[in-house]
Image (cartoon, grey):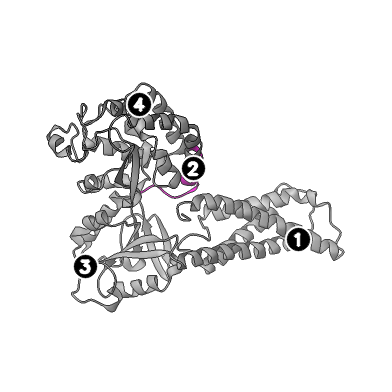
């Protein structure tokens, strides 16, 4: 859960860092006053405080450093905070010189900045240590696939396993060369054909892929990297990897320098705001829709069978979860599906039939106005889904995906999505559906989500669900 909400937590940290700076300046003022130094009223230092704070927090933001990130280290914390504070000092001096502002006690300025440095060191090192301890207990981790040979992989495996605070769980190892089985491979899933990496990615939950070799089979590895990028999975490369493609950024896994590539949605404040909106909106909707949902329950009970239809679906980066809907079909519908496979109106791995005889009369009404989807609001609240995002597929459908189509899974699945508000009844080719989802991911924004939600309301009222 910590990993899911880390961007929201980062915003809170920025506010707490501002409090650290305020405490440092207040402490400096108190110490110097007690020491007999003549100072103006504390409020008269509001401008330099504002300039310094803005510079420090802005510097940390621009450099995209946060102490809670998986690959951050205490040394990085000290270095980045020191850089930000020094930048803040010079920025204050520059602003006061440029605009020829009134004289300010240099002793107070440098005492305040020095205490700010200490306070920020302590705070950020505490956060870094806290998250490292959390990960050592097996929480807030990511799933890692290692690609290499029996020479390059053992030291990497050793570094990852000896540093649990990095929060990287080795999901599997892809051995490109060698028939040996080093002791480091014990207890790990080992695959041996790079050409089958698509199957490996599709059958496992993978967040990051670390390549430790390149020259041995460059064409195969480039195809493997493309397969990762198609799926929105991060690609990490050792610095001796020697690849000519564009680099997203450089990062570190313990003492291992990496190139990081990603075509998935970038983690940041906007994604944190999306999740915050999902939590607040889903909680409010569940409270407001108690009576309507109770009425739906009574309608569903008019036909034999359970109230809810629970089905396994595929979520973010291949994670499985149980999705709940109000039952709209007769209770033997799943057993009868094979009878109607030839009547599928959707080209591709998705089944769609306009006049499906397995749907009950009540279910037809619920589907028409999307009332059967209401229980999914709970999945939004718990984090398995979002209000807006690509629709969650069945595992059997995902098994039939082409590589590029799997990048739909790089965004948390949603109750509504772009294809539902742009003519869900007119789209009969899954390739077109997938292209709309990828366009949504590539151009994703909070305002775009809001537009989709606003377009969903009239679509529901008009009853375009069938």
Q: Which residue is mark 4?
A: 369
Say which of 348 and 111 sits in front.
Answer: 348
Question: What element does badge 2 sit on?
Answer: helix
Q: Choose between 387 and 50: the one closer to the eye.
A: 387
Q: Answer with mark 1 or mark 2, whichever residue precedes in sequence.
A: 1
Q: Are marks 4 and 1 in contact (CB under 8 Å)?
A: no
Residue 460 part of the magenta segment: no
Question: For mark 3, what is the residue?
Answer: 176
Compute the Cα span from label 3 to label 2: 43 Å
Tell me the CA gap for discs 1 and 2: 38 Å
Answer with left or right where residue 178 lies relative to residue 93.
left
The reply to whether dot 1 and dot 2 touch (C-beta < 8 Å) is: no
Q: Which residue is under mark 1?
A: 27
Q: CA distance from mark 4 to mark 1?
A: 61 Å
Residue at x 14% of width, y 34% of height: 340
**Closer mark to the observer between disc 2 and disc 4:** 4
Gap in angstroms between the C-alphas marked 4 and 3: 52 Å
Which residue does the numbered mark 2 point to in the structure image? 279
Q: Which of the two discs, 4 and 3, sits closer to the camera?
A: 4
Q: Between disc 3 and disc 2, whose residue precedes?
A: 3
Does residue 79 lie above or below 290 as drawn? below
Dot placed on the residue nearer the N-terminal end, 4 or 3: 3
SS at badge 4: loop
Q: Quick check: is 279 in the magenta stretch?
A: yes
Which residue range is magenta in the image? 264-281
Residue 238 percent coordinates (x, y): 35, 66
Give the Cα separation between the discs numbered 1 and 3.
Answer: 59 Å
């Amino acid at each position: 859960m910590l990993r899911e909400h880390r961007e929201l937590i980062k915003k809170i940290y920025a506010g707490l860092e501002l409090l650290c700076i305020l405490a440092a300046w207040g402490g400096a003022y108190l110490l110097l006053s007690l020491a007999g130094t003549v100072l103006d009223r504390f409020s008269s230092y509001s401008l330099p405080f504002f300039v310094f704070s803005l510079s420090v927090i802005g510097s940390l933001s621009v450099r995209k450093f946060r102490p809670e990130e998986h690959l951050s280290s205490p040394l990085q914390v000290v270095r980045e905070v020191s850089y930000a504070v020094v930048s803040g000092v010079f920025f204050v001096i520059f602003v006061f010189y440029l605009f020829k502002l009134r004289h300010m006690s240099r002793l107070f300025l440098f005492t305040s900045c020095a205490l700010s440095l200490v306070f920020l060191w302590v705070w950020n090192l505490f956060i870094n240590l806290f998250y490292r301890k959390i990960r050592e207990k097996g929480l807030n981790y990511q799933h890692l696939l290692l690609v290499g040979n029996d020479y390059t992989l053992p030291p990497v495996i050793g570094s990852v396993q000896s540093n649990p605070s990095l929060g990287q769980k080795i999901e599997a190892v892809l051995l490109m060369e060698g028939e040996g089985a080093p002791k480091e491979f014990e207890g790990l899933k080992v695959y041996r054909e790079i050409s089958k990496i698509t199957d490996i990615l599709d059958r496992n939950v993978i967040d990051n892929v670390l390549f430790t070799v390149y020259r041995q089979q460059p064409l195969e590895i480039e195809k493997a990297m493309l397969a990762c990028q198609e799926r929105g999975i991060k690609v990490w490369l050792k610095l001796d990897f020697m690849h000519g493609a564009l680099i997203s950024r450089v990062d570190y896994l313990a003492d291992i320098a990496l190139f990081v590539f990603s075509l998935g949605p970038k983690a940041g404040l906007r994604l944190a705001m999306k999740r915050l909106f999902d939590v607040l909106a889903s909680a409010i909707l569940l409270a407001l829709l108690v009576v309507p949902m109770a009425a739906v329950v009574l309608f569903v009970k008019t036909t034999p069978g359970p109230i809810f239809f629970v089905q396994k679906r595929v979520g973010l980066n291949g994670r499985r979860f149980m999705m709940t809907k109000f039952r709209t079909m007769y209770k033997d519908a799943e057993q009868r599906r094979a009878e109607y496979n030839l009547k599928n109106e959707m080209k591709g791995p998705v089944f769609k039939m306009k006049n499906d005889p397995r749907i009950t009369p009540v279910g037809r009404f619920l589907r028409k106005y999307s009332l059967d989807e209401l229980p999914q609001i709970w999945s939004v609240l718990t984090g398995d889904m979002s209000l807006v995002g690509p629709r969650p597929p069945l595992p059997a459908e995902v098994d039939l995906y082409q590589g590029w189509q799997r990048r739909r899974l790089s965004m948390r699945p949603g109750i509504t999505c772009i294809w539902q508000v742009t003519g869900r009844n007119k789209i009969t080719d899954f390739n077109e559906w997938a292209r709309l989802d990828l366009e949504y991911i590539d151009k994703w924004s909070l305002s775009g989500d809001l537009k989709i939600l606003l377009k969903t309301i009239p679509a529901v009222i008009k009853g375009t669900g069938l």
